[in-house]
Amino acid sequence: MYESLLENIRCVYAKAVPKKIINKENVNVPEYLQKFCKIVEQSYEKVSESRCLCDYIEYVKLCRRYRKKLQKFRSNAEFQALKKVGNSKYSKFAKNMLKPRKIEVPTFSDDHGNISRSDQQKAEALASSFEAQFINVRANSFTTTHASSDQTIPWVTDNEVLAKINKSKKSCSMTADKVPFTFIKYIAPFICSGLAQIFNLSMMRGELPKAWKKSIVVPLNKKAKPKEPLDFRPISLTSHLCRIYERCLLSKILPVLEDLEFWSASQHGFRAKKSTVTNLLECMNDWTEYLDTKKQVDIIYLDFAKAFDRVDHELLMRKLENLKLNNHLLEWINEFLTGRSFRVKVGDALSQEKMVYCGVPQGSVLSPVLFGIYVNDISSKLPPGVKCKQFADDTKIYTCTSEGDINNNLQEAIDYIVKWSETEKLALNNSKTVHLTLTLGRKTRVFDYFINGTPIKKENVTRDLGFLISSKLDFSEHWKKA
């Protein structure tokens, strides 16, 4: 049924949307610059044939004039665009202008000395690296206990589907559906009824179309200059239509969690009126209050290795079952997580298909909330005096000490979280876990903290949700980088 609908959409798309090859470098460039560009190209061809110094000098002069004109045009275009969006949207506009337009994947060399130079070889190397992170293989299949639930079966209506499509952003990213979402938005009024029936049938049967379990992974670099596959984060481009259904389900799951008062007060991700800003504001309020009373603050920034990719499906499903969600919804989520596959895309090259054995796909709509449910209880049994703040997998714990204190409860909290991480199969990354001490006094009370006997690295400056936090809490280091 789904494939039939999708095939008809593809057919309409192929017939109704004309294909046109556009030179990306000259998009929105005025005619006079396009003509000047042709003159530069003709000059280059002349130099290639004559190999004359005079022609080469003339070519260089033309190139410089063209670059100046192009730079002047782009600067003016940015200014006009800024005036159009207004000052209130400046931050969003600037962020969009500054983000990289193309992800550069460097040449890789594996343990055997094999070098990956072509896009195809790079895609295969990244795919193998991502696949190696799926270490928590499910031992048993999940079956619901059919316990009673107050939540009704989350059916969706035509109007709900249409509203979710209209609210979603346009996208031309190619997924397993092979239809750009921009085109789906145009035909939404005509297909929303059919989609609603397919969505409800999928929920009733606990089955998903094959295309919904396939992802095209785009590597996103974690560092400014990545050198190896582990320096990339796998971002999954999943089915556009599946994402619409996920949004419908999310709107039915979140109210249940709020009614249960499920979320920990320390968690600032995935929740209404919570964000990185509220996380940092609460921390700053605590830290400045401690420092004003001449106390020292010790902070441990915890890092979980490949957190999203290593969520154990069996443990996650048991946690969802404990929330007494509807059995149909539980079976659907279990099927959504089971038997997934992915292919890595570098340039126009796609890797061989690889299987996913654990984790939640980074980039899907439900994944952040599912991960939040998985780690929600991390702060439930911390010792007195230790506070925890979370944003998704970014977790920090801290406490204060007064002059004369010879110890605190922070090591006990670390030991608890280490034990929790072993139980939940989310290993801590010792090399990225850091200890920062905040103090305004001349003398710093030195405390050493350990993870399974390994000392935690001490830093004077560390990054906290985008901000550089220094031991004096004066933001001078952040201003230097800004």
Image (cartoon, grey):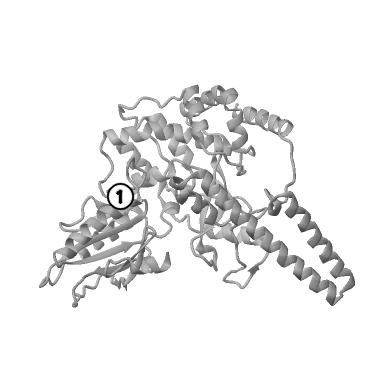
Residue 277, position as x, y percentages in the image: 33, 51
In the image: residue 323, left or right of residue 141: left
Question: Which residue is located at x 31 percent, y 36 percent?
Answer: 257
Q: What secondary structure is marked by label 1?
A: helix
Residue 247, position as x, y percentages in the image: 45, 35
Quarter of the image with the C terminus is bottom left
In the image: residue 367, left or right of residue 442: right
Quarter of the image with the N terminus is top right
Question: Which residue is located at x 45 percent, y 56 percent?
Answer: 135
Q: In this orientation, does residue 324 appear?
A: no
In the image: residue 48, left or right of residue 329: right
Residue 404, position as x, y percentages in the image: 10, 73
Local packing at callout 1 (Cα closer than 10 Å; few below 14, some 14-19, many 20+) is some
Rendered position, 254 above or below 150 = below
Q: Quadrant of residue 425?
A: bottom left
Amino acid type, residue under disc 1 in the picture: Thr
